Image (spheres, grey):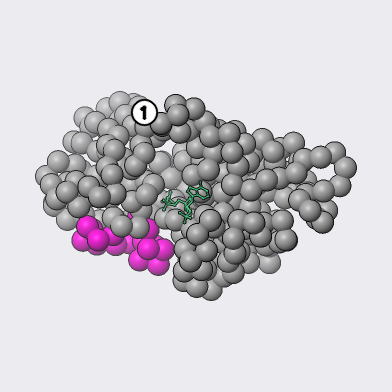
Amino acid sequence: MNYCVIGFPISHSLSPALHNRAFRKLKVRARYTAVEVAPSDLGLFMRDFSSKYSGANVTIPHKEKILDFLDELSPEVRAIGACNTIVNRGGKLFGYNTDVLGFMDALKSEGVRNLKGKNAIVLGAGGAARAVVYALKKMGAHITILNRTLEHAQKLAKNFGQNFGGLEDFNKLKCDILVNTTSVGMWHKENKKYMSEAPVSICHCERHCFGFGRPRPRNDMIIMDIIYRPRMTKLLRDAKKAGCKIITGDKMFMNQAKRSFELFTICS
Ligand code: ATR
């Protein structure tokens, strides 16, 4: 049985190592590879997918476009409009989204179960952001989506009845939990190095500020990055220096992978 993760870029992905190790451990005869698929090649790649693969993970930037190639969508994929896991059952392709539970499991593992009445900021408005916004809404948070391209933020905010703005609005907002879903700070294939940038700047000066005119962050402010390579992104390093509670991206990555693996092996 062959499985893969498709994305563009894909060299940063740790999914092959993780899934192959789990297959070996459970003595499942299967192989999991990373396949770089450019956005313009997605249709071509999906044409003979079902004859080649038993399942796949889908990552940046295909999580939304992939829906056009699936036969059945889980209720979550339908609600979110993004899919990160495909299971091939007898030639029929089923789409799931394990990012939602992966994200919620990551928060739970850090003791966060309920965000009722809390102010959440989501950076980014792509496929991963859709799952994060869906999960945060389920947990009761009031959400503001901030994105480089305002129209994308607006569209996502409208879908979920939430607020939106540009990344530059970050310092004007109240924030109990911030989640970065943009790719800023991720391992960079071309440069073969980590991007030493953060999507927003968190001031960590000793005294009193968290951006202009804002009080210093409280210890209970949570800053989470869903990037897992590197584990400590610049955003998280800055947040730590500023005294915030941080949640690294490997937590969500491991949890979503575990749920995808269950779909590949137990339920198929
Ligand atoms: P994914 O499926 O992982 O969410 P995606 O759909 O390609 O991937 O979304 C990537 C997100 O990162 C988008 O919100 C994108 O912003 P735009 O909507 O403006 O494209 C954001 N992003 C990518 N590169 C960025 C950069 N250099 N600065 C700020 N935001 C960036």
* Helix, strand or loop under label 1: helix
**Residue 244 placement (x, y as % from top left):** 73, 44
The magenta span reads 67-85
**Local crowd at mark 1 within 10 Å, few (<14), some, or many (≥20)?**
few
User: The N terminus appears in which quarter of the rendering?
Assistant: top left
Q: Residue at x 35, y 66 (%)?
A: 78
Q: Which residue is mark 1?
A: 17
Amino acid marked by disc 1 = Ala
Position of 148 with respect to 118 (left or right) is: left
Q: Is residue 192 visible?
A: yes
Q: Nearer the viewer, residue 140 or 187?
A: 187
Q: Quadrant of residue 256?
A: top left
- Decide whether residue 2 is among the magenta residues: no
Q: Is residue 66 above or below residue 160?
A: above
Q: Is residue 194 above or below residue 177?
A: above
Position of 11 with respect to 221 (left or right) is: left
Q: Residue at x 39, y 34 (%)?
A: 13
Q: Is residue 134 visible?
A: no
Q: Residue at x 74, y 36 (%)?
A: 241
Q: Quadrant of residue 83?
A: bottom left
**Residue 117 placement (x, y as % from top left):** 68, 66
Position of 145 with respect to 267 (left or right) is: right
Q: Residue at x 39, y 47 (%)?
A: 60
